[in-house]
Image (spheres, helix red, strand yellow):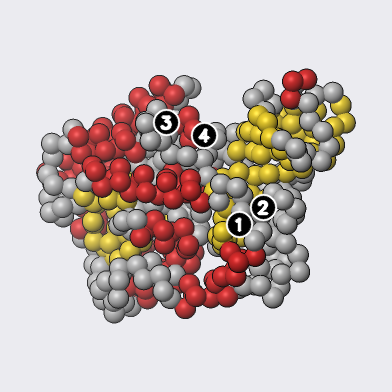
Amino acid sequence: MALNDVRTPATQKIHTEPADYRFKAFPSGTSWLSLAEIPEQDWNALSGDFSLPVMVLKEAELNHNIERMAAWCNGRGVLLAPHAKTTMSPELVRRQIEAGAWAVTVATVSQARVLAEFGMRRIIIANQVLARADLEWICAFLRGDVTREVYVLVDSLAGVRLMDEALSGIGEAGRSLPVLLELGYNGGRAGCRTTDEALAVASAISSSAHLELFGVEGFEGLVPGETAIYRLIAARAFLAAMTATVLALHNAGLLPSRPMVTSGGSAYFDEVVREFVGEWQGPPISVVLRSGCYITHDHGLYETASPLRDDADPFLPALEVWAHVLSVPATGLAILGCGRRDVPYDAGMPVPLRVRNADSERGLADAKVTSLNDQHLFLSFSDENRLAVGELVCLGISHPCSAFDKWPLIPLVDDSYQVVGAVKTYF
């Protein structure tokens, strides 16, 4: 069986599911229609076939981003384990694996269970795992199949002890559970804050009957800083601290012969490669990036933070949300028919891009989203960009991770917004 075999019963079941009332925006009266039949319907997402609002996934941009990241990693000799929490779409993960991804990353065992059902066999759970039921599932997944791999994080003596106690009562998985030592920084979330702390936890892992240390993990993507340059400095400082800890663990004989060193979101993955490939002078390591949001990029957070933003071949925004102008109740104010149920807002408001009517399409350069309700969006605009009731507004999004979870089924469209398929999510 292939490392990641996507031809599973669960995969086939996706294509037989009905495109019915459960999936917002999709045409009504389609309970007889399977997802596999969607490309044959000659639907257009913007011509009246779909209810609005609708979030669309643009296939050309999606494919470009997947291939671009795969080529970037391959050219630098690093492995890619894309973070599936961004999309939680087995179909999109399959595309990433087929493009050369080494593994898939998830944030929880629940997410790992979903992707395992769809054939994923090498999974990094980038989190602490302490619940007995979660550890039982991991053991059952690993038991009797040497081609399956699951890596989990640990960052404390208490975590090592609790995992050991739970695993001792579960029964053998046939091998020790692979763990990665999580490193953190002051003011961040989980992870050892000092090298001495990391050495102590690594020593406890080496004494464990149920755990085996495979490498070191960190995440630089949320480092604090008032400006972009200060965040870059902070990211570099954290990665340098990771290097010092990896070397200390190696010198103490606590790491395997070629440990995994994994970091890298979608904002500083170039800095990870600079630190652990370009400037690395330590023992042989396997560098694994875990970027997730690159797959669709965006018009907000990653438009300004992506390492490839000034590249000749950058990532391209692949997600758009289209909504009607429902009301123009005051001068310079339009109310759109979408809201917090439809667009992300945790890392920036949606970005107005274009407006379309029956006759033309034009830009919205100086329009701005000022507020969101559950189902309504407040859009300010100038006299030059006067909006009318019934027009369609295209919104770019900021932060893909908070967009996919709002849409259980997303139409996949070509450049003319013809629907060529659909992507199902499992949040």
Q: Nearer the viewer, mark 4 or mark 1?
A: 1
Residue under label 4: 301
Q: Residue 150, percent across and down?
A: 33, 64
Horizontal side, residue 206 vs residue 3: left or right: left
Q: Of label 3 and label 1, which has the lower sequence position?
A: 3
Q: Eyeballing the image, is 136 above or below 346?
A: below
Q: Amino acid at mark 2?
A: Ala
Residue under label 3: 309
Residue under label 1: 419
**Label 4 environment density (alpha carbons within 10 Å; few <14, some 14–19, many ≥20):** some
Q: Is residue 178 visible?
A: yes
Mark 3 and mark 2: Cα distance apart in space: 29 Å
Are the residues flagged by discs 2 and 1 in contact, CB closer than 8 Å?
yes
**Label 3 environment density (alpha carbons within 10 Å; few <14, some 14–19, many ≥20):** some
Q: Eyeballing the image, is 209 above or below 311?
A: below
Q: Of label 2 and label 1, which has the lower sequence position?
A: 2
Q: Secondary structure at mark 1?
A: strand
**Label 2 environment density (alpha carbons within 10 Å; few <14, some 14–19, many ≥20):** many
- Residue shown at 34%/56% (left/top)? 99
Are the residues flagged by discs 4 and 1 in contact, CB closer than 8 Å?
no
Q: Amino acid at mark 4?
A: Leu
Mark 2 and mark 4: Cα distance apart in space: 26 Å
Q: Residue 221, percent across and down?
A: 41, 37
Residue under label 2: 45
- Residue shown at 22%/39% (left/top)? 276
Mark 3 and mark 1: Cα distance apart in space: 28 Å
Between residue 303 and residue 406, name the one nearer to us.
303
**Which image quarter holds the N terminus?**
bottom left
Mark 3 and mark 4: Cα distance apart in space: 11 Å
Between residue 41 and residue 312, name the one nearer to us.
41
